[in-house]
Amino acid sequence: MSIREILKMGDPRLLRIAQPVTQFDSDELHLLISDLLDTMLAAEGAGLAAPQIGVDLQLVIFGSNARNPRYPEAPVVPQTVLINPVITPLSQAEGDATLLEIDDWEGCLSVPGLRAIVPRFSRIRYTGFDQYGDPIDRTVEGFHARVVQHECDHLIGKLYPMRVRDFSRFGFTEVLFPGLDAPQDD
Ligand code: NI
């Protein structure tokens, strides 16, 4: 178990298309997950993707089983290890083909000190596997859906600034939120 260096935007390793995990429940995989968790907790992140510590695999972690005392209003997202994920955007209701996007603030541990308004699908289904190879299949919305989309973007070489549409709402955290405990980095 150790805290690993988080790569910062500009590092070409953050731009790779990550490789699928083929071996589940291995010592190597458990060690990687333990390092990711230690690194995420140390940085007080909401999530972390393997490429952010230079590991070229389709693996992300996010969520926390405890409510964060710094953000008591933030919805609880269960602590999750998600491997080889597939995301499907969903409409709000059966028979409605419209995919709704919502804007909210995001940060990223690979883009320290900055925040932007990023559009994300409001409702998604995501599937994949946990570290034991057991399937995960969830339909989620809001903050949970946002965190999953942000983390899984790291697996296709996308950092949130690449999703920003309105650059007038992109800036330094300390300037955007003076004196406030700013929203978490993802
Ligand atoms: Ni990120």
Image (spheres, helix red, strand yellow):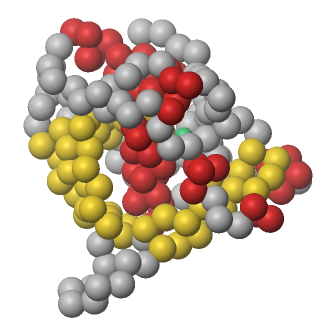
User: In the figure, is residue 49 to the left or right of 177?
Assistant: left
Labels in figure, total: 0
Camera-side residue of 144 and 60: 60
Q: Is residue 180 visible?
A: no
Q: Quadrant of ligand 1?
A: top right
Image location (x, y in percent) of residue 164: 63, 59
Q: At 49% across and 64% down in the image, what residue appears?
A: 120
Residue 3: image x %, image y %?
A: 53, 14
Outermost residue, left side: 134
Left or right position of 20 against 49: left
- Give the residue at x 48% y 49%: 150
- Front residue of 112/63: it is 112
Please determine whether, in this image, residue 1 is positioned above or below residue 152. Answer: above
Q: Position of residue 137 (x, y in %)?
A: 18, 53
Residue pushed farthest bottom?
95
Q: Is residue 93 left or right of residue 44?
A: left
Query: Which image quadrant for residue 140?
Result: bottom left
Looking at the rendered image, the quarter that the C terminus falls into is top right
Q: Is residue 112 shown to the viewer in this render?
A: yes
Q: Is residue 83 above or below residue 122?
A: above
Residue 81 in the image: above or below residue 85: above
Q: Where is residue 113? Give x, y as percent.
A: 76, 39
Which residue is at 41% across, 26% downward?
Answer: 50
Q: Quadrant of residue 90?
A: bottom left
The quadrant the N terminus occupies is top left
Write the residue at 20% across / 44% down: 128
